[in-house]
Image: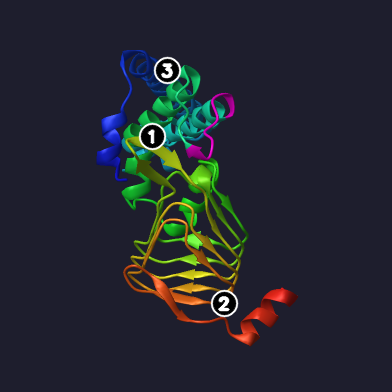
Amino acid sequence: MSPESRCRHLPGMPAIACFAGLLAATAAAASASAAGLTHLAHALLPAHGTLAGPLAPLLPAIACIVLFYAYALLLHRLLLHALPLRSGPVESSVRAAFGYQLYLLFYLMVFNALIRSRVLPIPLMRPVYLALGARLGARTHTGGTILDPAFVTIGHDTLIGEAALLVPHVLEGGTPAHFPIVIGNHVTIGTHAVLLAGVTVGDHALVAAHALVAKGTVIGPGEVWGGVPARRLRGARADLLQRGQTA
């Protein structure tokens, strides 16, 4: 389900009004903090210091943008703690629906642009995804896009290729739902591959470039999958399984 299709489930005025207030407060806090930091830097550094260079006029704006996203990420995590999203279809209760609506607004209006813009280099996207709730093992990086990071768990030493897409959400019978994607250790996901909701990938497996792994697929340790829809191209190699047992 693309961001565009999820727009059909945008909330009514109460959630929009709440989101607008939170967004305005976040922007105001970021602006005030940036102004304070800039003033402090000017006070501490000499006039001929780094703040007097050609980039000096841009520093307050850059600081404001960085602080805005930092505060927005913190607020997002607090909201997920207070109004957690559960696996499966979004509950029809007022509280669950309101929490999902706020989550969706933050995703579409704030974080979607950051995730998809490719402004940040790959190493810097790791802390962003961690802040958004993804569970990433050591030395794991992604050149692709992780949607709904709170529903994604990836082991250590795994590489997600350029423009790959992990999509833990679906639209079933008109109701949005989330099913976790779990990827093991030493896994390679090829460029432009797509993993849909509920996919599990075992240790040392490989998903070929441009593969489309259907919802709920289980890829065993050491297996190689590819194609549209993806199917097993090669079974697990004994050396990979032995390496996985000793890792």
Q: Quote the CA–CA distance across marks 1 and 3.
A: 14 Å
Residue under numbered circle 1: 65
Q: Residue drawn 39% across and 60% down?
A: 214
- The stretch of residues the image draws in magenta is 81-88
Q: Which mark is residue 25?
A: 3
Q: Earlier along the polypeptide chain: callout 1 or callout 3?
A: 3
Residue under numbered circle 2: 222
Q: Secondary structure at mark 2?
A: loop
- Closer to the observer: label 2 or label 1? 2
Q: Secondary structure at mark 1?
A: helix
Query: What amino acid is found at the position of numbered circle 3 in the picture?
Result: Ala
Q: Earlier along the polypeptide chain: callout 2 or callout 1?
A: 1
Q: Residue drawn 58% across and 74% down?
A: 204
Task: Categorize mark 1 by other alpha carbons within 10 Å: few (<14), some (14-19), many (20+).
Answer: some
Q: Residue drawn 44% across and 58% down?
A: 122
| Left or right, 246 with reference to 137 | right
Q: Is residue 234 above or below residue 207?
A: below
Q: Quote the CA–CA distance across marks 3 and 2.
A: 49 Å
Q: Compare residues 223 and 64 and report the one nearer the observer.
A: 223
Residue 139 in percent (x, y) is at 59, 63
Q: Is residue 53 at least partly visible in the picture?
A: no
